[in-house]
Amino acid sequence: MASGIWRESEEEQLLKLASSGADAIEIATSMNRSPDAVRSKLKRLHQMGREPISEDVREEVVEFENVALKSEVADLKKAVLGFQEKSAAAEAGVVIPEWKDDWDGNDAWTKAEKLGIREIKKAKLRGKFNVNFPTGPIAIACISDQHIAPGTACDLKRMREDAELIHDTPGLYACLAGDGVDNHIKIQQAYLAARSTPNDQWRLFDHYLKIFGDKILVLISGNHDAWTTQIGGVDYLSKIAENNKLCYAPAEARLKVTVGGQDYDMLIRHQVGRFNSSLNQTHVVKRFWEMNDAPFDIGVIGHHHAAALEAVTKHGKRIYAARPGSYQITTQYAHQYGFEHSIPTCPTFILFPGERRIIGFDDVRDAVWALKGARGE
């Protein structure tokens, strides 16, 4: 007696015998099958739409379109084919897994491609801001590396006074360029030696932001701020910015500042991983202007705590390259490795309406004196 599996050639032979008028017993004898197996197979073939079928196994069939039935039949076909494959493989000693990976490469690639397009668009627009002043002149102070940490050599008094000066001076605004807090959670030795916790520092920084009132144009993060993100997965600075209704961007901001119809492009970054020079502090800003995809009229890069300001000519235009100082005058690390004391200066730029005219000052207090004169106050 043959096995229960019907090969395609046997199915064809079965249909030919049935169409010739042979009954189930004759077919069973010819094909070495049982009559019941022949009747059952003929019935299944009929359900699958394969004809002819012998009269002694034919059943009355009502012809109508039934979507649910067609779907069920299709599922049964798959189940039968799967069973037949398993049975054939078992006879051949092949292992068939019960589970198959339903991952669709084309579908996954399409989704990843769309996500990539969206992320590229976000990356190109991230950190870009438009600021419009109907009249002028106005001034923008760039402040970086406050490193708020009670119990350290941090000039909190000068920091507060500068923030109050910006708040009280009409037409004067601020951009904050990162490392507002010391936040030494990444370096264990510094964390253990600190006289304040990161939580205390963040709360003081939040109070510091409120001193400015509505004078902060943009706030970016520095490497000390980003340590919370890197270690804990939470961009805490973005939450503080959101609570204070401030424009925020990680690491870099590009501002298109319009004063009385005149446009100025500003770049504010906390740090750059190349082009730095200990002999020429503004070198990194000038190289960044040359190597970057978009030029700027004013470039400010913090992080090094070394104050510098330079006016240079690029393609027939006068641009400014600046490095803010730091309110953190010194640290144990700076003293040990011979770094000089920092100067808490905030490079400030007066921007005029109607014509492209920029005057840069290495300190906000000098700029306030000039701004009041330019505004006729």
Image (cartoon, helix red, strand yellow):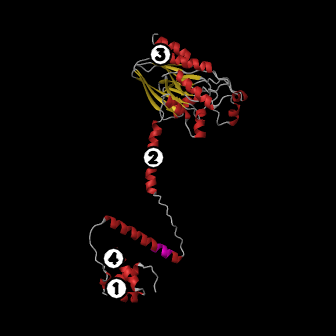
Tag 4 near tag 3, CB within 8 Å? no
Mark 1 or 2, closer to the camera: 1
Question: 359 or 78: which is nearer to us?
Answer: 78
The residue that disc 2 covers is 115
Q: Is residue 210 left or right of residue 8?
A: right
Q: Earlier in the sequence, mark 2 or mark 4?
A: 4
Question: 86 or 13: which is nearer to us?
Answer: 86
Q: Residue furthest left?
A: 63
- Residues under labels 1 and 3: Cα distance? 103 Å
Magenta-span inclusion, residue 88 = yes
Q: Amino acid at mark 2?
A: Leu
Tag 2 near tag 4, CB within 8 Å? no
The residue that disc 4 covers is 46
The residue that disc 3 covers is 170
Classed neighbour count for the residue bearing mark 4: other residues with Cα under 10 Å, few (<14), some (14–19), many (≥20): some
Q: Is residue 162 left or right of residue 42?
A: right
Stretch in magenta = 84-89
- Residues under labels 2 and 3: Cα distance? 45 Å
Q: Earlier in the sequence, mark 1 or mark 2?
A: 1
Q: Amino acid at mark 4?
A: His
The residue that disc 1 covers is 17
Q: What residue appears at the point 55 percent right and 27 percent down from the top-left corner?
A: 206
Q: Earlier in the sequence, mark 2 or mark 3?
A: 2
Q: Position of residue 165 (x, y in %)?
A: 54, 16
Q: Residue furthest top?
A: 377
Look at the numbered disc 3 and give the secondary structure of its residue: loop
